[in-house]
């Protein structure tokens, strides 16, 4: 089974650049405190790195 990442939006995207908003929407994060589980791939890791100051990430199985 593939490793997964639990990603939670902990800071608002109000006032953030459009690039950050697009990354968050691409991951399925639209509201504060929403959590999504995504497969751990290099693409997702790159997206998390871009908005690491807005999200909290946990590894899960």
Image: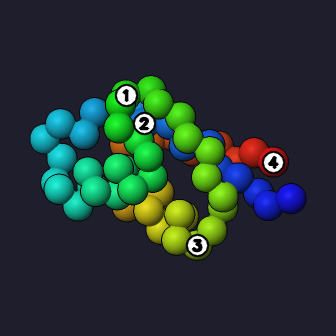
Report the Cα–Cα distance between label 1 and label 4. Answer: 24 Å
53 and 59: which is toward the camera: 59
Tell me the distance, in whole angstroms, between the alpha carbons under discs 4 and 2. 20 Å
Q: Which SS class for mark 4? A: loop
Q: Residue at x 55, y 41 (%)?
A: 36
Give the vertical position of 17 relative to 54 (above or below).
Answer: below
| CB atoms of marks 1 and 4 within 8 Å | no
Mark positioned earlier in the residue sequence (2 or 3): 2
For marks 1 and 3, give the CA distance: 25 Å
Label 4 to label 3, Cα distance in Å? 17 Å
Structural distance between the alpha carbons of marks 2 and 3: 20 Å
**Label 1 CA crowd tier, 10 Å (few <14, some 14–19, many 20+):** some
Disc 2 crowd, CA 10 A, few/some/many (<14, 14-19, 20+): many
Quick check: 41 above or below 58?
below
Q: Are marks 2 and 1 in contact (CB under 8 Å)?
A: yes
Give the mark, 4 or 2, whose residue is nearer the N terminus.
2
For residue 53, the mark is none
**Which residue position is annotated with label 4?**
61
Q: Secondary structure at mark 2?
A: strand
Residue 52 located left or right of residue 11 = right
Residue bearing mark 2: 9
First in sequence, mark 4 or 3: give its number.
3
Identify residue for label 1: 32
Q: Position of residue 23 (x, y in %)?
A: 34, 57
Residue identifier under label 3: 42
For mark 3, give the secondary structure.
helix
Question: Residue at 18% of width from left, 36% of height from top?
Answer: 14
């Amino acid at each position: 089974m593939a490793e997964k990442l639990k990603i939670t939006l902990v800071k608002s995207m109000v006032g953030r650049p459009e690039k950050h908003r697009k990354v968050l929407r691409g991951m399925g994060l639209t509201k504060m405190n929403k959590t999504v589980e995504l497969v751990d791939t290099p693409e997702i890791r790159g997206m998390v790195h871009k908005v690491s100051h807005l999200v909290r990430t946990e590894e899960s199985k």
